[in-house]
Image (tube, rainbow, N blue to C red):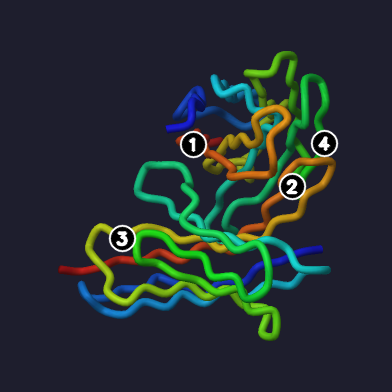
Amino acid sequence: DAGITQSPRHKVTETGTPVTLRCHQTENHRYMYWYRQDPGHGLRLIHYSYGVKDTDKGEVSDGYSVSRSKTEDFLLTLESATSSQTSVYFCAISERAGGPPGELFFGEGSRLTVL
Amino acid sequence: GNSVTQMEGPVTLSEEAFLTINCTYTATGYPSLFWYVQYPGEGLQLLLKATKADDKGSNKGFEATYRKETTSFHLEKGSVQVSDSAVYFCASRQIIQGAQKLVFGQGTRLTINP
């Protein structure tokens, strides 16, 4: 298994509260991604990172911010959670530094419920 | 932008039945195509891939052929097992700034009954 740890794995919160999800990797992969999974939509890219402090938006980035202060950690923050952000969030990684394009490896997911 | 459309599920089959899950894509150029599988309570795992037209990806008895004429990448297996019960996602890939941006279909839930 790729060394990807997501935390927390489950969280219930209330509308308007801030939430941070953490993705930690031990694989020294350059690229990290946050996806959300919703019924009928598959997985949709929220944000991704192509290096320390280098991030960019995906297709559903509104209401989310990210930070990557070191190679192994990629944080996803909901500044003020809304019910529409209830979802399962997956972190993914790819490409050891200097390697060719290859497979994405996914974490086990973080289930977020916003009441 | 790229998009991927999968046949809607859920799909329920008996063990040893033949499986087809349809997938079509729209894209500029010829993106690499993937099938991912998600077992209950887990993240996605790569099942197979094809990087150019007429390539056939295969793994664990599953196959899919990249057909540019029909912009399709249908997943097939000749004889399914109970352990194949999972959600299957078709995806196309763009590489932007070196990062792999996968566009997923909506997923197809497959249940195999003994």
Question: In the rendered image, which quarter contains the N terminus of chain A?
Answer: top left
The residue identified by callout 2 is A60
Question: In the rendered image, which quarter contains the C terminus of chain A?
Answer: top right
Instruction: Tell me the CA gap for discs 1 and 3.
Output: 19 Å
At x 45%, y 36%, the residue is: A108
* Contact (Cβ within 8 Å) of mark 4 with mark 2: no
Please name the amino acid that badge 4 sits on. Asp
Please name the amino acid that badge 3 sits on. Ser
Instruction: Tell me the CA gap for discs 3 and 4.
Output: 35 Å
Measured along the vertical axis of the image, is residue B66 above or below residue B35? below
- Chain for numbered disc 3: B
Q: Position of residue B91 (x, y in %)?
A: 61, 60
At x 55%, y 43%, the residue is: A87
Q: Are marks 4 and 2 on the same chain?
A: yes
Secondary element at image label 2 = loop
Q: Position of residue A19 (x, y in %)?
A: 62, 24
Q: Residues within 10 Å of mark 4 (few under 14, many from 20)?
A: some
Q: Which mark is residue A109?
A: 1
Please name the amino acid that badge 2 sits on. Val
- Which comes before the other along the chain, label 4 or label 1? 4
Instruction: Tell me the CA gap for discs 4 and 2.
Output: 11 Å
The residue identified by callout 4 is A56
Q: Residues within 10 Å of mark 1 (few under 14, many from 20)?
A: many
At x 58%, y 45%, the residue is: A103
